[in-house]
Image: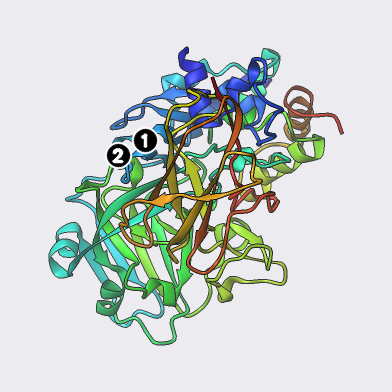
Amino acid sequence: MDRRSFVRGMAGGAALAAGPLLLPRAAFAALPAGALAGEELGVLPGKRPLIKRSFRPPNYETPIGEYASLLTPNDRFFVRWHLASIPEIDPRDWRLSVAGDAAATPLELSLEDLKHGFERVEVVAVCQCAGNRRGLSDPHVAGVQWGSGAMGNARWAGVRLKDVLAKAGIAADAVEVAFDGADQGALEKTPDFIKSIPAWKALDENTLIAYEMNGEPLPHLNGAPARIVVPGWTATYWMKKVVSIRALRKPLEGFWMQKAYRIPKGKFPVVDRFTTQENADTTPITEMVVNSLITSHLEGQHIRAGTPTTVAGIAWDGGFGIRSVDVSLDGGRSWQAAELGSDAGRFSFRPWSYSFTPARGGHVLSARASNGVGATQVDKLIFNGPGYHNNVIQRLALEAE
Amino acid sequence: MDTIRTWVLLAALAVPFAGSADERSIRMKDGAERGLLVANCSGCHSLDYIQMNSPFLKRAGWEAEVKKMTAVMGAPISDADAAALVAYLAREYGVPD
């Protein structure tokens, strides 16, 4: 297998369909032809090869094989930036401003202040781009054409945002907390990437200002020296290279809140609401929908008939916890319970596996995760213009011979 | 193509945020339009965004993308260049209406 078909197989499972089909096509969506033609393995500073979607700003996804381990290695963790100027910050020079009209005692903190002035805490949590799998939308929609690799699971260490906000004297009537990072557009007129979360979410004990990832300082391209971690919620709120935190009495305005990262109201089975930013039709995206990924097999893979075979993968959701994963080998006609693996907490990937002995012939492999509030992956895409929340059940054609 | 303006734009925009050497591997369809793309697009982002988003947008879809760049992202693209860009993108990277 040459490098390109390897990449395609990892990214979208679409390339192997170029040859004669083994089965009636499982009709699972594929990336746009232009995205497949343009992808390549690319090496960014401090990273092993990742799947390039765009050079600048850098948008690179994690090869699926990396999800075989519970924690995604830092040097293989996906990279996603909106704006092309991404300064490398000397940790000794970094300062974090904590202010806003709802902060009675504004602060400025160095990294040392953060590390020594507050309790250190850790959480294992999935960081997933809101647009992960956008490239599999049918019909396709504009944006970064992500396959399944715009996500990763890491052990984040840092301090509770609520502890820092308390020290800054956050008022009881604060409605949102806003984050700005050090990144900038090439043009002054380009809206700065600033995001807010509801005050209740900012004060959740799991929401962190993180300075470590998997026991190491954050990589430059994943937000060094510090980033916001909002377990359960999509990565748009996990501000990288955060330099400003503001407690606000009024909802944050601007393109990135009022126009971007919004979903149609009532279309998805999400629980968390962001009421101060809702309008008549749309609401900001909040927690991730329940999802799973098969990591052990690729589309079109040949397996040995009559030999015990284990299929495996991961499941995750918006923080309610994975309750079950079912596996089908007949295109979804019948389902069997997979065995759940180690539990690193409700915000983490949850490994699963299922063993069977395949009969000769074609099989269509699917996995379907359900979470603690009874939500389940969907058979058919809930289409939305920005291409968010794609948790369609995968269908991989396997041939046992 | 107005080469002086191209140079000024490149000097103003692209130098501090110069693309990686890897970007030179990007090949755009119909090279005659390269100056238009360099002058109006690559100051802010690599041109692989265009190929990645193809071919599925109709003309109106590409028009919306160019308009997003001018109206939202603040790209200083003249009306004439915007029209030429939409025509190029629809022709080379779009699907028929």
Q: Nearer the viewer, residue A76 or A358?
A: A358
Q: How is the image coloured?
A: rainbow
Which three-letter amino acid code belongs to the residue tagged 2?
Pro
Q: Position of residue A338 (x, y in %)?
A: 45, 49
Which three-letter amino acid code belongs to the residue tagged 1?
Glu
- Chain under numbered label 1: A
A94 shown above or below A89 = below
Q: Position of residue B19 (x, y in %)?
A: 45, 27
Confirm whether circles 2 and 1 share one chain: yes
Residue A307, located in which quarter of the rendered image? Answer: top left
Residue, x 71% and y 36% (percent of image)?
Answer: B78
One can see residue A309 in this view: yes
Residue, x 47% and y 12% (percent of image)?
Answer: A2
Q: Residues within 10 Å of mark 2 (few under 14, many from 20)?
A: some
Q: Position of residue A170 (x, y in %)?
A: 34, 81
Q: Position of residue A254 (x, y in %)?
A: 57, 62
Residue A158, located in which quarter of the rendered image? Answer: bottom left
Residue, x 58% and y 50% (percent of image)?
Answer: A391
Going by the picture, which residue comes out furthest to the bottom? A172
Q: Secondary structure at mark 2?
A: loop
One can see residue A82 in this view: no
Q: Which residue is mark 2?
A: A73
The disc, 2 or 1, on the residue closer to the chain's N-terminal end is 1
Residue, x 41% and y 40% (percent of image)?
Answer: A79
Q: Are marks 2 and 1 in contact (CB under 8 Å)?
A: yes
* Quarter of the rendering occupied by the C terminus of chain A: top right
Q: Residues within 10 Å of mark 1 (few under 14, many from 20)?
A: some
Going by the picture, which residue comes out furthest to the right? B97
- Residue B52 lies left or right of residue A61; in this view the side is right
Q: Which residue is mark 1?
A: A66
